[in-house]
Amino acid sequence: MRHQFSPDLESPHTTTVAACLKPTRVGRFADTRASSSMRRIYRWLCHFSPALAAQLAFRQLATPPRSAPGRWPAAIREHTRTRRLPTGAEALAVYEWGQGPAVLLVHGWGANATHLGRLVQPLLNAGFRVIAFDAPAHGQSTGRSTDMVAYANAVAVVARDAGPLHAVIGHSFGAAMAMYAARDWGMTASRLVLVSSFNDCNWFLEMFARHAGLTPEVSRRTRELLTLRYGGRLDWDRMSVTEMLRQADRPALVVHDENDDEIPFEHGLAMTTALQTAQLKATRGLGHHRVVRHPEVIRRITAFLVD
């Protein structure tokens, strides 16, 4: 029987990483002519040179698509305070508005801070100070490549610079990395909002491996390259976003659209089912990206932070 989703939904159903490995026609892992060509290349490399295939997959995984920064909404454009924040050898572009309790916005993979721009004015109206940034190798920040560890570290660096956080709002990959930053990198916030997030970081790697047609051996080698890069700090057995959210032990709002073509709705449902203290805002027809711009979603997020 199909559920009729209300704005806030609790369900007994759970999901696993494997359950969401479905063929896709749209979204980040869509089957296209380019992806078909890529699979042919990887098929050859996986057979004749697994080590080279893993190196190529690692490089491809660490290179986000560069999207041109959009325009900030007119109401906040002239009031944007922009600065550069060093993090290692790179520099992050940081944007800030207003005064009051701090709210940090964390965009997703291949996006940039302007993707969450519609949230800024309503949060300012509610009395918050808003901080956003471009992740490493995204937007106006420096770097040509990044990964989960560098991304989560950047979240923590901006959070420390901003001072005590009332809340963090993350979208998609950025939501998961905010939780990773909370568990392993010292980021703290009184409230957490996860929009269109996957519930396990392994899902992102498994979807890429399926999309590229990697063999299990090459997929394993690709994971090991990232593990070795950071001396074992990244433990793939501890990358459940649900568990990170549980360990954070903070009031949390999970927002997910039933028609999300990039990260299935089951991910958000699984997180809120596993965590009785987490609230779920379920939407329909907004997809993966429009959900962060919809007025009703913005009102719900703002109310959650004010309550």
Image: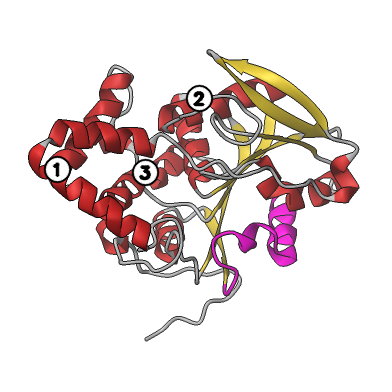
Q: x, y percentage for residue 264?
A: 42, 63
Residue toward you, 14 or 58: 58
* Magenta span contains residue 276: no
Q: x, y percentage for residue 263?
A: 44, 59
Residue toward you, 183 or 58: 58
Label 2 residue SS: helix
Quadrant in which residue 187 is drawn: top right
Residue drawn at (51%, 53%), measured in percent from left and top? 277
Residue drawn at (69%, 53%), measured in percent from left and top? 304
Q: Which mark is residue 46?
A: 1
Label 1 residue SS: helix
Residue toward you, 51 or 103: 51
Label 3 residue SS: helix
Q: x, y percentage for residue 156?
A: 56, 25
Residue drawn at (44%, 66%), measured in percent from left and top? 26
- Quarter holding the N terminus is bottom left
How far is the residue under mark 1 from the one under mark 2? 32 Å
Dot 2, crowdedness within 10 Å: few (<14), some or many (≥20)?
Answer: many
Q: Residue furthest top?
A: 89
Q: Is residue 96 above or below residue 289?
A: above
What's the image's color scheme? secondary structure
Judge left or right: residue 206 versus residue 194: left
Mark 2 is on which residue type?
Asn
**Residue at the spot of label 2:** 153
- Looking at the rendering, the stretch of residues picked out in magenta corresponds to 284-307
* Magenta span contains residue 306: yes
Residue drawn at (57%, 76%), measured in percent from left and top? 6
Residue toward you, 87 or 8: 87
**Residue at the spot of label 3:** 201
Whether residue 50 is visible here, answered yes or no, is yes
Mark 1 is on which residue type?
Cys
Q: Are marks 3 and 1 in contact (CB under 8 Å)?
A: no
